[in-house]
Amino acid sequence: MSGPEIVTFGCRLNAYESEVIRGHATLSEREDVIVVNTCAVTTEAERQARQAIRKLRRERPEAEIVVTGCAAQIAPDAWAAMPEVSRVVGNREKLEPAAFLLGRNEPILVDDIMQVQETAGHLIEGFDGRARAFLQVQNGCDHRCTFCIIPFGRGNSRSAPIGQVVDEARKLIRQGVKEIVLTGVDITSYGPDLPGRPTLGQLCRRLLASVPELERLRLSSIDPAEVDEDLWRLIAEEPRLMPHLHLSVQAGDDMILKRMKRRHDRNDVIRLTERARDLRPGIVFGADLIAGFPTETDDMFRNTLDLIADAGLTWLHVFPYSERPGTPAAKMPAVDKGLRKERAATLREAGNRSVFAHLSNQIGNSVEVLVERDRRGHSAHFAAVRLDRDAEPGALISARGVAVEGDTLVAEAA
């Protein structure tokens, strides 16, 4: 082993930031350090992180265990109180190499995240051995959904300047990356804190124009309430923008959406998917959905379940609602936890049927596959694909769908 062990929980942004941490020169030769990058989106995510920390301590009793990420940012004292933990480092501080200097021994290095005004000025050079890489363009969130604690872990919204994003994209391309995924906490809120107030669509347009060698651009997740007109034009006209949008939907019932303090309603989601399909036939949608939000009745849940078919949602991220202390939703009348799990399972089953239908429609069709490893990759629509022969990681190859195995399309390379 060379360098630190990094254990990551949670979102794509956390995965991205773990690679930033891995690249710190102050950590590059330290095999005595374990960095645990936590998530606070659910209590289950925190439980898993605590369980992992205890296991790591048993396996490596001499190691320095540094805990960081959103859960650590929100409740640093609680993590520092774990006997297995050596130090707690905040979400801003984890991106600074000085936080990991040998000899630093303060138990808690966490500042007020709400005072942070900039994204990290340094982004990663590329994910080792990967054809796809994440590129952070935004961090934090100005919205206050009633179920969400993440703004208190990430701070207010701030954007990376377009020039910086372009420079980092070029670095990734030089490392062999073929697909870049723009990521952040709320990327459709990109831009109002920058000179000229650029939008996400304008950022994408500038990036694609400035880096013509970038073969694929993908967006990590978008808010249905914030799609700008430049982004709509790119969906219609730019083949390098992948025909796959992941939507932060959360629910399909208007009353639940209102109680969540979301800024869209059910029909907004349906109109968005219809407009996107008109502009880009065949485009595929993913969505985040929460099951068992407080006050959710059977009829309200049915509206969310029906939205999968009504909006044509395919790749689902489903979560049973999890109380987060300090959020307004935690004080609302709760749905039984067993019922939450049942409803989440029902949503996942519907999602599995949608995935099977999408993959089945690809049988006999040509799909372009970005090869990642072990004959596996993803199509432009983000379908997992297994090829019938070896191909070089990073290659973009044409293949023909021949079968469906679980959530994977089996394809013959041309």
Image: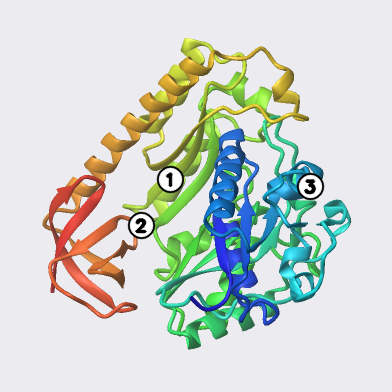
- Residue 382, labelled with which disc? 2
Q: Is residue 164 above or below residue 159?
A: below
Observer able to see residue 66: yes
Residue at horizontal 70 percent and vertical 49 percent from the top: 70
User: Disc 3 marks which amino acid?
Assistant: Pro
Image quarter of residue 400: bottom left
- Horizontally, residue 294 falls left or right of residue 134, namely right
- For the residues carrying marks 2 and 3, which lies nearer the camera in this image? 3
Observer able to see residue 141: no
Tags 2 and 3 in contact by the CB under 8 Å rule?
no
Q: Which of the pair 397/103 is nearer the observer?
A: 103
| Residue behind mark 3 | 76
Residue at horizontal 26 percent and vertical 80 percent from the top: 392
Tags 1 and 3 in contact by the CB under 8 Å rule?
no
- Residue 286, labelled with which disc? 1
- Horizontally, residue 354 falls left or right of residue 266, namely left
User: Disc 1 marks which amino acid?
Assistant: Gly
